[in-house]
Amino acid sequence: MTHRRSRSLIPLVVLGCAILVPAPVRSHEFALESVMNAFVKVEAREAHLVVRLPLHVVGTVKFRLKGSEIDLANAGPAIQQVLEGVAGGIVLAENGRPLAPSRSVGRLSLPSDRSFERYDAAVAWVAAPLAIGTTIYGNQGYLDAHLTYPVASPGSRFTIQTTVAPELKDYLKLTIRYLPLHEAERTMVITSRSGEVSLNPAWYRAGAGFVLLGFAHILGGIDHLLFLLCLVIPVLRLRQVVAIVTAFTVAHSFTLLGSAYGLAPGGAWFPPFVETAIAASIVYMALENIVGADLGRRWLITGLFGLVHGFGFSYGLRENLQFAGTHLLVALFSFNVGIEIGQIAVLAAVLPVLRLVRRYVLAGRAGTIILSALVAHTGWHWMIERGEVLWKVEWPRLDAASLTVLARWVAGVLLAAGAVHVLRKRAGSVLSRRAAAHPPVEPV
């Protein structure tokens, strides 16, 4: 019987190795990114879009040339054609209704011009005539446009979407500096793949979007999911699972919020350090499972590694905070809620399967060792690959500023550890009371 079970494990182990062996790293092909710079200003009865497009982006519009130079005296029809394309390619909408420009002005500019550093300067520049003797070569320089839209109210919900040169995908970015009436300026970067983006989202819209973002982030983070798997491989009781997941949740929430407020260490060394540490956490937890984990204190080491994973979560959040508008706290909370929903969904799917595997296929300590070894194999490869990247970056100097940041995080870690300990005790007492209130029924 034992021999038969051992033979039945071979295909499973081979399949697990095939699934968990990391795919070879593919190098990204170099592609030149292009940027369109824009201002969107909302006033009492008008909205203004002032945008600068590189000429190669509007290559479908042909300007008349004199040799290799643009015939500026006869460029008017081509400029008008580009303005019509901008009105259709960059769409402003008010309360879901696309706006049509009532006025549009455009001009050509040299590559060396710096007028788009401020809104007022950009508006004045677009309205000014070209200087006599200006020479602009084909596919060099910019086309600047100013479009004016009538609006019903400055308090309306405004959205923007770009479909300019969609064949360039994410390589063509639209940088928007949004200037709402009586509010601070905000900046965001979108592409043709971003779809319709709200410039001033309501709190509930921002919250719903960041819940979905957090949910998608955890489901797409295979390293975070493998760490969760390592946590629950040797765990058979619900009380232990609750304590461990609570520690992980509190810890990664702590560093996620701190990073969002700019309290994380800076420098090129920190992102690869975090990625390497995440891989190392997977290897450590898998090895602890193999040698025999103290499940009663697993929550403590889980909380420490949760702090590292929180920094990893923050990278998925940081580039999207631009879409939160004025609702930063709502976005942070909602993103974290999305992560927790994703974790619960994963555990709800994994735990029953893991219980069946541990009972009928890989029973006892052998099952824990085999599953953990498969996960450790993948984590080890990730750790080596990421460690090579980390080895090549410049490490920070231990100056006064660095020591101050370190002291803050040490104090924060101690605070988070205390919070985890309190929550763990409360969760354990709740489960104990429920177990006492509903004791298992002995079979007759």
Image (cartoon, rainbow, N blue to C red):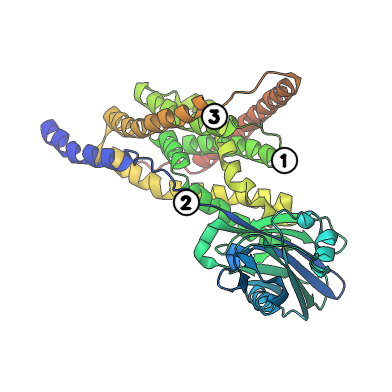
In whole angstroms, how far apart are the C-alphas of marks 1 and 2?
Answer: 28 Å
Is 47 positioned to the left or the right of 349 in the image?
right
Helix or strand or loop: what does disc 2 sit on? Answer: helix
First of labels 3, 1 by sequence position: 1
Look at label 1 and name its amino acid: Tyr
Q: Nearer the viewer, mark 3 or mark 1?
A: 3
| Front-lying residue, 322 or 432 | 322
Residue 181 against residue 320 in the figure, above or below: below
Question: What numbered label is drawn on residue 273?
Answer: 3
Helix or strand or loop: what does disc 1 sit on? Answer: loop
Look at label 2 and name its amino acid: Ala
Residue 136 location, x and y as percent?
68, 62
Residue that label 1 marks: 261
**Image-quadrant location for residue 407:** top right
Q: Is residue 427 visible?
A: no
Q: Nearer the viewer, mark 1 or mark 2?
A: 1
Q: Is residue 395 visible?
A: yes
Look at label 3 and name its amino acid: Phe
Residue at x-position 66% and y-position 32%: 266
Residue at x-position 82% and y-position 65%: 123
CB atoms at circles 2 and 3 under 8 Å apart? no
Residue 322 location, x and y as percent?
68, 53
Residue 366 location, x and y as percent?
27, 29
Query: Label 3 neighbourhood size at 10 Å, few (<14), some (14-19), many (20+)?
Result: some
Helix or strand or loop: what does disc 3 sit on? Answer: helix
Query: Label 1 neighbourhood size at 10 Å, few (<14), some (14-19), many (20+)?
Result: few
Question: Which image quarter is the N terminus in?
Answer: top left
Residue that label 2 marks: 345
Outermost residue, front direction?
67
Residue at x-position 71% and y-position 20%: 403
